[in-house]
Each structure stands twice: as C-alpha cells, then as structure tokens.
Amino acid sequence: MNVMSISQIAEAAAAAERIMAPGLEGGAAIRPGVHLWRLTERHPPLPTVYEPALCIVLQGRKRATIHDAEYEYDPGHYLVAAMTVPARSELLDARPDCPFLAVVIGLDPAHLGPLLRQVGSSDDSVAADSLRPMASTPMDPGFARTLLRLLDAAASDPMWEVLGESLLREVHYLALVGPAGGLIREVARQDGPSAPAVRAIRYLESHVREGAEISALARVAGLSPSALHRHFKRATGQTPIQFLKKLRLHRANDLLLSGGGVTQAAMAVGYGSVSQFSREFKRHFGVPPSRAR
C-alpha cells in the first residue's frame, strides 16, 4: 500500500470514529448495506457466519478461518466474502488506545447484476476445483479514495441521499475489477462450475427452518448426491449438514441477541428439541443459549 492509500485509510478511520456513537463497543448499521465496527480488545477465534460482503479494516488486524484456509486482513488488505459461509473469526490487534475499526459493505445483487452485464466476463474466473468462499486482496489508492468518499457521504443525510447509491455502486465496481473480481464473478454466475454449490448454499439459507434432504438439495444443485457433497465441501470446507447446523445456530443466536427466548429461537430455526438445541449451542459457542447476550 502506497503513502497515498495509507493517508486515505487514516482519514477513513477518523471519519468512522466521528460517525460512531462515543465509546461504541461493537457494530452499528450506519446506512443500508454499510456497517461500522469498533472493538477495543482482542478476542480468540470465535464462530461466526460471513455473508457476501467487502470487509475493510481501517485500523487493527483480523483473521478469518474456514477449514484449513486462513485469510488475514488489515488496512493494507480487504476481505472479499463472496458467499455465505460459517467460519471462525479472530481479532488480532485491538487496544483501548488504538481500537479495531472496520467497514463492512454488503455485496448487493442489485448493484452486482447490472455491473456484471457491463463489465462482462474475464479470464480470471475461478475454476470450481480452486473455488474458495473468500479472498484477501490488496487495497489500492482508487479503492481507498472511494471508501473515504463513501464515509464522508454516510456522515451527511443530504449528501447520502444524493451520492450514496452511486458510491456504493462504485465500490462494487472497484471490487469487481480488482484482484478478487474473478471470485465475485464466478459466485454470481448462473452457469459457471461453482453454480451448483452456490445454488445449494442459497437454498439452505432460505430454508433454514425446514432444512433439506440431501437428495432434494442435490436436485436443486443439479448434481448427484455424491457430486454435491464433493462440490459443497470444496467450496465451504464443510458438508451441507454441517453448514446447515451452523447456520441454524447463528440464526438462533441472532434471535437471542434481539431479545427472543431460548424456546422461541430453537423452534424458529427448526429444532424440535430445546435440550438438543441447548447442547449444540453450548458446544458451538462455548456458552448456553441463556447466556448468549
């Protein structure tokens, strides 16, 4: 990262601090599709679910781990999460006097669809055999400059109303033509080699409560059950059943954090037994659901 990018990221960090509530510990949605995070303490690897987004660190350092793959990102690199995937997240650098600051910008199909048609295909698409759900990519001056403009606009209602959508579109465009653009294009394609695994993931996302038999999921993906298993595990590092279980637990955790009860959360994500849900929740998160908050 050159001197100009470093300066722009430092300015973006200052802009983020101005937007956030004083002393905020955690995350906040500042505009549709844009979240800011501020944390003052490191934490060990914790289970989480990454959804399609650009994760941009302004200050500090973080690591995402999926199966045997690690992705570190810092002010010199941003993370492209191209598909929904359970992972482990570790905060590597955060202190009260130098908090971890990050912007998360959702990869919105409403922006990606038209841009993909305009940008067209590219030789850097990712083959199914090497498909990964994430990539850590270098921050370039153009991306850093647009990010700073985005945060400046996010701080002003009139400015956001006029410029917000165009700046979000510009960020999506720069990600598409950047080093990880091939990954984003491959996951977004309807007919590429990764499409069966992506279709299966999206089906499980929208059917968390009822789930799906492997045979039914294979039909959605257009593969045999054994081929689906291979494709899915190659893309996500886990089987469809493992993926669904983790997705259910994280959806339940979201319900608990928003004030729902344990029984309500368990039933909402498809558990027929509250005791089984509590056991699996504690095994995954390290605390019982009654202490999720």
Image (cartoon, rainbow, N blue to C red):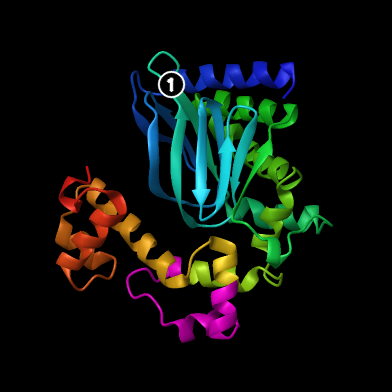
Height in image: 59 above or below 234?
above
- The image position of residue 161, as x and y in percent, is 54, 34
Q: Amino acid at mark 1?
A: Pro
- The image position of residue 151, as x and y in percent, is 55, 27
- The image position of residue 114, as x and y in percent, is 70, 55
Name the residue carrying label 1.
99
Q: Residue at x 64, y 70 (%)?
A: 195
Identify the magenta region: 204-230
Q: Is residue 280 left or right of residue 193?
A: left
- Please check the rendered image and state whether residue 100 is part of the magenta-colored stretch, yes or no: no
**Residue 19's image quarter?**
top left
Q: Is residue 120 visible?
A: yes
Q: Is residue 69 left or right of residue 92?
A: right
Q: Residue at x 73, y 18 (%)?
A: 4
Front residue of 26/282: it is 282
Q: Residue furthest right?
A: 123
Q: Residue at x 51, y 39 (%)?
A: 63
Q: Residue furthest front?
A: 68
Q: How many marks?
A: 1
